[in-house]
Amino acid sequence: MNIEKLESWFLNHKRKLNFRGNTDPYLIWVSEIMLQQTQAETVEPYFEKFIKKYPNVQSLANADLEELKKTVEGIGYYRRFKLMHEAAMVITTKHQGRFPDTYEDVIKLNGIGKYTAGAIMSIAYDKPFSAVDGNVIRVLSRYLGDYGDMRKEKEKKKLDQYNQHMIEKAHPRIYTESMIELGALVCKPKQPQCESCPLNEHCFAYQNHSVEALPFLSKLKKQKVFQYHVFILEDEHHYYLRKRTESLLEGMYEWPQFESESYYAAIEQLSERGIEAEIIDSLGHYKHVFSHQIWEMDAYLLRIIQCNSSQFIKIKKENLNQYPMAVAHQKIKIA
């Protein structure tokens, strides 16, 4: 691999992103966590808002978790921010508020895996630790002509070993960002811009007209579909919410919802929880797609007649926007 050509390409073509161009490990950590399963363009406004509110490890460690989740409401995959909060508390107690500067200490932090640890070590500290994400897997599998199933850890590990060998010959900080940027801008999943790629001269896939065939990824299991009836419960001045305890969207608030194909069966489930209500309006059908499941939701506005339940949280209507709610339920139009 022509590392010099790759790094030169990056320095001339990199995107101007608000989370790039610094070596502060805290800022790099925040950006890398936000970039998990999220596009760079989506991350930018969230990153700016987050850093303004939590400019350092100490402020994040002292954050109210519910307020933290409200800050990132809408970005999805909220468990990562709960883990960030836990990691920040560890840094303040175990590392005296200073972000650790060894790979061994970084990877021990909650929510940090091999890729994120490698990205922090190489970008923040300019140390040669491989960082292989989806973009880098795509670049390397095409460049090397590796037809292994990249859903399998053993196959990804081979690319990681090659990447480690390369970064030891490079400028770690520039190399890591170069590989990620190349995958994002040039070596894209579809319609890659091979003619402008700095590595095309020795790229197996380009030279053998097999770019579209790589990387090879075995088929994912079909997403499970859930049929929900969602009830916007209200009285004259209040709404009634539920705080999720499930791992998916843990700690976020939602409208009461019940898995059922029948409205009347869902109403019966509501009644079993001590709430009697009358329907005011049908609010329509909504759909939300997660990575491993799909929610099909029929929403209804209900007025409470009697409530003998402690399962739901009663809030003033004007305070609704103070509670972090997942996008799936934000989609429901209640006014």
Image: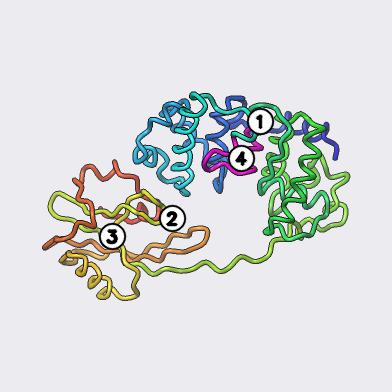
Please tell me whether residue 111 belongs to the stretch shown in magenta.
yes
Of pointers 3 and 1, the one earlier in the residue sequence? 1
Circle 4 sits on which residue? 116
Please tell me whether residue 298 belongs to the stretch shown in magenta.
no
Residue type of the residue flagged with mark 1: Ile
In screen coordinates, is 323 left or right of 186?
Answer: left
Q: Secondary structure at mark 1?
A: helix
Residue 18, visible in the rendered structure: no
Of pointers 2 and 3, the one earlier in the residue sequence? 2
Circle 2 sits on which residue? 248
Circle 1 sits on which residue? 123
Relative image position of residue 8 (x, y in whole percent): 78, 30
Of pointers 2 and 1, the one earlier in the residue sequence? 1
Q: Secondary structure at mark 3?
A: loop
| Alpha carbon separation for disc pair 2 and 1 | 31 Å
Residue at screen point 23% across, 61% down: 301
The one nearer the camera, 11 or 114, is 114
Q: Quadrant of residue 152?
A: bottom right
Residue type of the residue flagged with mark 4: Thr
